[in-house]
Amino acid sequence: MLITPNGLLTRRSVISSAIVASSMLPSVGVRRAFSQVAAFPLQSLPYPEDALAPVISANTIGFHYGKHHRAYVDNLNKLLEGSDMVGKPLEEIVKATRGDATRVALFNNAAQDWNHNFYWNSMRPGGGGAPSGALADRVKDSFGDYIKFRQEFFIAATTQFGSGWAWLTQSADKKLQVVKTANADTPMAQGTTCLLTCDVWEHAYYLDYQNRRADYVNAWLDKLVNWEFASKQLAS
């Protein structure tokens, strides 16, 4: 028999307490596992870090994906803790927080995660040049020809002041459009269908091109654009 500050504790009480405590461990483990699953992961790149070289070096991808993108994901998961956005799809979080002055940080990090996932898929090794098939027809119908599209996209990407993105999108009337957004903003948050995006934040190109954004955008269009991915985004 043991003496406690509150009186006597029998051997049977000790055994019962141990059983209760041990029975709680699995549920704690489940909660922790669920918490880890519920958090947004850093999605894997669709290719090795050196696959886009020499247009974009492994060094740039290592910093861009491994540092910048990872930071957005980590910050997003921290900001979600205890919020009413827990468990919601990433797109829904972006749309729900855009323009909400009380949730600027949550929008910025959620949108940057979505934008970067879209950006990585907008490129492929050996990509670039003009599209083919149905997408080529859409480009011709919307811009006149590929050259005019390329000029419009280049201008959007190089004239976006400061940090941001250049996009090829599809409007509600199925016309293709080139738009640009600042910082973390994304046409997706406004219900627009996105087909491609080029990241023009400096961390996307500065290690390889320094201040020569135009050279980066030209190389991106001519050697990296993933038209197959864009075609899959087309609304019928």
Image (spheres, grey):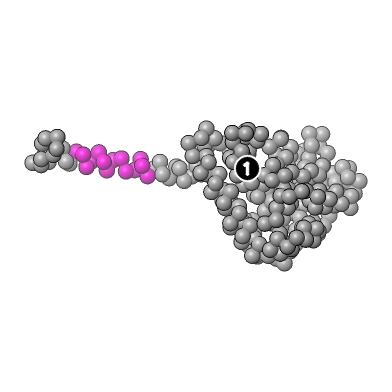
Residue at 71% x, 49% y: name it: 163
Q: In the displayed structure, does residue 180 sit left or right of residue 104?
A: right
Q: Is residue 229 above or below residue 1?
A: below
> Which residue is rendered at x = 68% and y = 63% of the image?
207
Q: Which residue is identified by label 1?
A: 108
10 Å crowding of disc 1: few (<14), some (14-19), many (20+): some
Q: Percent from the top left, x then y, of residue 18?
A: 22, 42
- The x and y percentages for residue 214 are 80, 58
- Check if residue 21 falls in the magenta segment: yes
Q: What residue type is labelled 1?
A: Asn
Question: What span is colored magenta in the figure?
Answer: 16-29
Q: Is residue 30 visible?
A: yes
Place residue 23 in its image quadrant.
top left
Image quadrant in which you'd find residue 204: bottom right
Q: Residue at horizontal 67%, vertical 47%? A: 115
Q: Position of residue 139 (x, y in %)?
A: 85, 46
Which residue is found at the position 16% from the left and 41% from the top? 14
Q: Where does the C terminus fall, quadrant-wise?
A: top right
Residue 92 appears at what percent x and percent y? 61, 36
Q: Is the magenta stretch mostly helix, strand or loop?
A: helix
